[in-house]
Amino acid sequence: SYAHDPRVSVILLPSNVGKRKAQIAAIRRSFGDLVLNVDSDTEIASDVVSKLARKMQDPAVGAAMGQLTASNRNDSWLTGLIDMEYWLACNEERAAQTRFGAVMCCCGPCAMYRRSALMLLLDQYETQFFRGKPSDFGEDRHLTILMLKAGFRTEYVPDAIAATVVPDKLLPYLRQQLRWARSTYRDTLLGLHLLPGLDRYLTLDVLGQNLGPLLLAISSIAALAQLALTDSVPWWTGLTIVAMTM
């Protein structure tokens, strides 16, 4: 429906080269001051572009993201919980981070970037390696960290709403979370030196995000080891994990 619209240029790549290379191909062909990234399974509200663009009027802002909701939140118990998780991630975590101009991950379903900033960072973004191979995950977080390292602010705009499809089965959800976790740990290490210069709250927030799951894993393994080796039930460990979860 857009093929003959003179305002639209459709780029067909010869093969599926992944999100990062597709993004880079589009950015290099773009010419506007601002670039909006929208994932293929996402629908944005009609006022998203204007609301994000208003935030980008400040030349210090390199990227801004909108609020994410699950478009299929009523499909199952899992999609309902993910929708709740998205609300918390946006309206607690990102909302707190934006007070310091340092949202740590501008999410791919709805993120606007300053094109001049992107052009400065594109070579670094394209040539990222992980364990000796070109990286094929964690595009959103890595691009955000590059923006912060270059001295730009990253912001959250709560009334720019985007609805995205989320996994409705447990295994696809766990695979997605594993990809995101790998990106979180890898790119947090890359941006660790930035944290003291941003704010003490952000340092605490990021360390909590990264250490919390590790401590939970260690506690669970220790509890299983106690059960296996001593034949005693690790009540205190179990109660502590339950209390922290609640």
Image: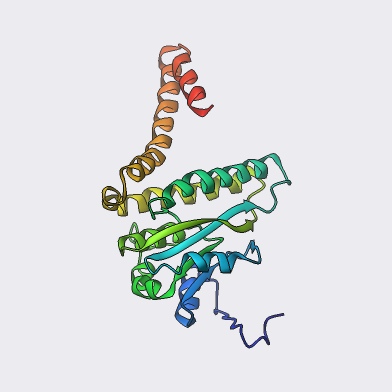
- Quadrant where the N terminus lies? bottom right
- Marker count (numbered): 0
Of residues 166 and 120, the one nearer the viewer is 120
Residue occupying the point 38% across, 60% down: 153
Tell me if residue 48 comes above or below residue 7 in the rendering. Answer: above
Of residues 157 and 104, the one nearer the viewer is 157
Which colour assignment does the render follow?
rainbow
Q: Position of residue 56 (x, y in %)?
A: 46, 67
Residue occupying the point 51% across, 69% down: 53
User: Could you tell whether 201 is left or right of 41 in the image?
Assistant: left
Q: Position of residue 79 (x, y in %)?
A: 66, 45
User: Could you tell whether 189 is left or right of 35 in the image?
Assistant: left
Of residues 168 and 28, the one nearer the viewer is 28
Instruction: State which quadrant residue 6 falls in.
Output: bottom right
Q: Position of residue 3 (x, y in %)?
A: 67, 84
Instruction: State which quadrant residue 146 falls in.
Output: bottom left
- Quadrant where the C terminus lies? top right
Tell me if residue 220 comes above or below residue 132 in the rendering. Answer: above
Residue occupying the point 41% across, 18% down: 226
Residue occupying the point 48% across, 14% down: 235
Q: Is residue 82 visible?
A: yes
Of residues 36 and 124, the one nearer the viewer is 36
